[in-house]
Image (tube, grey):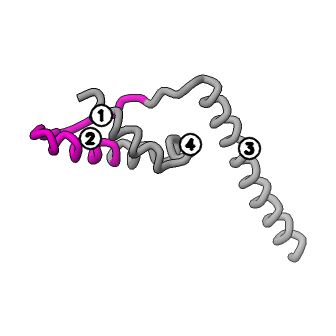
Amino acid sequence: MQRIALGAIKDVTTEYVAFDFFRIRNKIQTDIEARVREHLREFGFTLKKGLLIDIQVNQGFDKAIKETEVIRQRQTEYVFQKLNEEVLGQT
């Protein structure tokens, strides 16, 4: 069972980029559950409800994701600030 679950999790998680784990965690959980259900069905099992409680990653990877997310947010803020300044400059 563990191999089935790990295989399904690996299949699903490779379809997403790191930032998705912060933004669309519920969708990823739903996709993992569906994939595990599909694999278990092949062996005659029925999964009623799966619950992904936590996603743990290597600390260095986690730090890099968070730092990159902060930079992405700052870039977005900068773009909006620039647009705001342009609008104010035109009035």
Label 2 with label 4: CB-CB less than 8 Å: no
Q: Is residue 86 left or right of residue 6?
A: right
Marks 4 and 3 sit apart, C-alpha to C-alpha, by: 14 Å
Mark 2, mark 4: which one is toward the viewer? 2
Q: Which residue is mark 1?
A: 5
- What amino acid is at disc 3? Ile
Query: Which numbered disc flags the more N-terminal residue, 2 or 1?
Result: 1
Query: Which numbered disc flags the more N-terminal residue, 3 or 1?
Result: 1
Q: Which residue is mark 2?
A: 36
| Mark 1 Cα shell of 10 Å, populated few (<14), some (14-19), many (≥20) | some
Disc 2, SS: helix
| Mark 3 Cα shell of 10 Å, populated few (<14), some (14-19), many (≥20) | few
Point out the stretch of residues depicted in magenta.
Answer: 31-54
Q: Is residue 48 within the magenta segment?
A: yes
Q: Position of residue 23 (x, y in %)?
A: 51, 46
| Rendered image: mark on residue 49 | none
Query: Which numbered disc flags the more N-terminal residue, 2 or 3?
Result: 2
